[in-house]
Image (cartoon, rainbow, N blue to C red):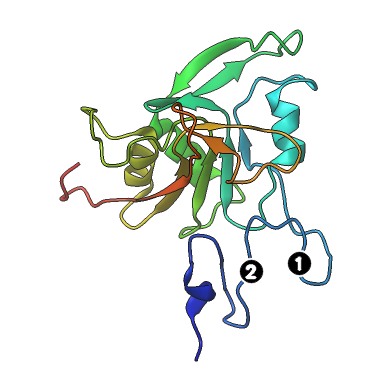
Amino acid sequence: MYHYAGNNPVKYTDPDGNSPANPYSKYDSYGRELAKGPDINLNPQNKETQYAQAESHIRYRADFVVAGHGNRMAMYKYNGYAKDSKDRGIPTPISAKALASMIKSHKNYKDGMTVILWSCDVGKAPDNKGYKNDCFAQQLADELGEGAIVLAPSGEITVGKGTNPNKIKNKDGTKGKMNKFIGRSTNEER
């Protein structure tokens, strides 16, 4: 009996139906490198800062990846070049609508791709418990369109060698996770 993506389509993909693959793996079953860095990197630019770390350590085999700083309600783009590892430059909030536009116009994006946000807290409290508005990840999924899938962390992330979804920590110290958000039609309650 065949089970699509090992009964775990959030963790595995199976585009040709032959065998499930972990999209976070850096190598295929033959040891060939498949992974790539983020498609959009909003981190401050400096070889010693998170920008360089994201480029070399956030590795995904498939999907469309956006890396940057953020919180539950926003992601930030940094203008200019950071002087050193302590200087991030000047952050500018980027709206879900603006990021959706950047994603849709990016050469690597294809309709139906899962978008992975590698940014602290942008997927926090998906049920909105204790909050008035949807989190940034849900807003982005809605802007990308009905049925669009966005995966985002529930807490703080660590960017460094070997970064993967298991490196998420909630503010209370518990292990975080990647939450899944699905774009809603304009007729659904938002």
Residue 44: x %, y % from top left: 66, 20
Q: Is residue 22 left or right of residue 169?
A: right
Mark identifier at residue 83: none
In the displayed structure image, the side of residue 141 where residue 54 appears, left or right: right
Q: Picture quarter containing residue 82? A: top right
Query: Between 167 and 39, which is closer to the camera in this rendering?
Result: 167
Amino acid tagged 1 = Asp
> Which residue lies at the image location 74% right of the left edge and 13% below the top edge?
85
**Label 2 Cα crowd, 10 Å radius (few <14 / some 14-19 / many 20+):** some
User: Badge 2 is on which residue?
Assistant: 21
The count of marks equals 2
Q: Residue at x 70, y 44 (%)?
A: 37
Residue on which the image places disc 1: 28
Rendered position, 179 above or below 91: below
Of callouts 2 and 1, which one flags the residue occurring earlier in the amino acid sequence? 2
- Residue 36 picture location, percent across and down: 72, 49
Q: Residue furthest right?
A: 31
Disc 2 versus disc 1: distance between alpha carbons?
Answer: 8 Å
Going 68% across and 8% down the picture, which residue do you hit? 87
Q: Position of residue 179 (x, y in %)?
A: 42, 47
Q: What residue lies at 26% left-to-right and 51% top-to-bottom?
A: 184
The C terminus - image quarter: top left
Residue 68 percent across, percent down from the top left: 57, 29
* Res 58 → quadrant: top right
Quick one: which residue is furthest to the bottom in this view?
A: 1
Secondary structure under badge 2? loop
Find numbered disc 1 in the image and state the secondary structure of the residue it sits on: loop
Q: Are marks 2 and 1 in contact (CB under 8 Å)?
A: yes
Instruction: Choose between 81 and 151: the one closer to the eye.
Output: 151
Q: Is residue 188 left or right of residue 147?
A: left
The type of residue carrying mark 2 is: Ala
